[in-house]
C-alpha cells in the first residue's frame, strides 16, 4: 500500500477517534441525536463495515472465495447495530479500535502488489477514510455539550 494512503487512513482514524473520546457515554446513547441514530449506533455501524472489510480483504489476501456482496446495506447496518446494542459506549470504542487495527494488520500482511489492487484500495478507503468523513460531523455534533435548559 502506498505509504501516503496508510498515513491518510491513520490520520483520519485518529481524528475521528479524538471526537469519539470526547462524547460522554450518556450522550452517546441518546436516541435520535443524529437523525434517527445515536452516536453509539453510528459507531456500531462503522464497526460492522470495518469488520466486513477485514473478512473481504482476508479472502483477497488468501485467495479464498469472497463473502457474498452485501445486497441490502440498510439491513446490514441494522444487523451491525443490533448485534452491538447491549455493549457500553466504552466497549464499542474498544471494539472499533481493535477492528481498525485488525483491518490495518490484514492490509500490512498483503504483498505490495496486492495492496495496490484497486479492489483492495476501494474497500480500504470506503471502510475507513470515506466512511469517517461521512460521519465526522455526526460525532462532532454528539461531542458538543448538550444545550443548557436554564434561561
Image (tube, rainbow, N blue to C red):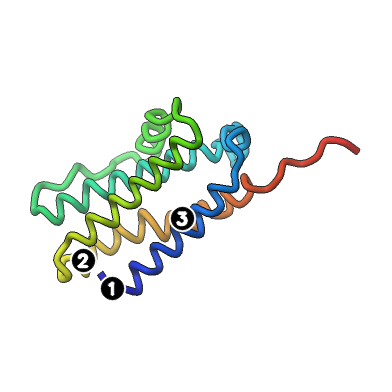
Mark pair 2, 3: CA separation: 21 Å
Quarter where residue 83 is shown = top left
Query: Residue 109, percent across and down?
Result: 18, 59
Looking at the image, do the residues carrying marks 1 and 3 touch, with CB atoms under 8 Å apart?
Answer: no
Percent of width and height locating residue 29: 57, 33
- Between 108 and 41, the residue placed more toward the observer is 108
Going from N to C along the chain, the mark reached first, 1 or 3, is 1
Viewer-nearest of labels 1 and 3? 1
Task: Please give the residue where the numbered disc 3 appears in the rendered image.
Answer: 132
Q: Nearer the viewer, residue 90 or 86?
A: 90
Q: Position of residue 145 (x, y in %)?
A: 71, 45
- Report which quarter residue 128 is drawn in: bottom left
- Residue 3 in the image, given as x and y percentages of width and height: 31, 73
First along the sequence among labels 2 and 3: 2
- The disc at residue 2 is 1
Q: Residue at x 14, y 56 (%)?
A: 61
User: Residue, x 59% and y 48% (percent of image)?
Assistant: 22
Residue farthest to the right, as pictured = 151
Q: Which mark is residue 115?
A: 2
Q: CA distance from mark 1 to mark 2?
A: 8 Å
Disc 1 to disc 2: CB gap under 8 Å: yes
Q: CA distance from mark 1 to mark 3?
A: 19 Å
Mark earlier in primary sequence (1, 2): 1
Residue at coordinates 61% horizontally, 39% vertically from top-left? 24
The quadrant the N terminus occupies is: bottom left
* Residue at 51% in and 59% down: 15
Amino acid at each position: 500500500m502506498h505509504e501516503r494512503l496508510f498515513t491518510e487512513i491513520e490520520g483520519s482514524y485518529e481524528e475521528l477517534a479524538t471526537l469519539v473520546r470526547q462524547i460522554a457515554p450518556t450522550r452517546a446513547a441518546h436516541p435520535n441525536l443524529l437523525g434517527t441514530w445515536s452516536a453509539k449506533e453510528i459507531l456500531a455501524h462503522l464497526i460492522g463495515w470495518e469488520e466486513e472489510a477485514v473478512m473481504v480483504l482476508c479472502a483477497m489476501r488468501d485467495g479464498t472465495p469472497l463473502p457474498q456482496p452485501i445486497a441490502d446495506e440498510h439491513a446490514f447496518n441494522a444487523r451491525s447495530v443490533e448485534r452491538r446494542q447491549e455493549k457500553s459506549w466504552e466497549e464499542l470504542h474498544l471494539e472499533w479500535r481493535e477492528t481498525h487495527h485488525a483491518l490495518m494488520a490484514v492490509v500490512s500482511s498483503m504483498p505490495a502488489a496486492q495492496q495496490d489492487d484497486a479492489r483492495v484500495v476501494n474497500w480500504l478507503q470506503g471502510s475507513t477514510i470515506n466512511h469517517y468523513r461521512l460521519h465526522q460531523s455526526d460525532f462532532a455534533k454528539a461531542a458538543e455539550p448538550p444545550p443548557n435548559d436554564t434561561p
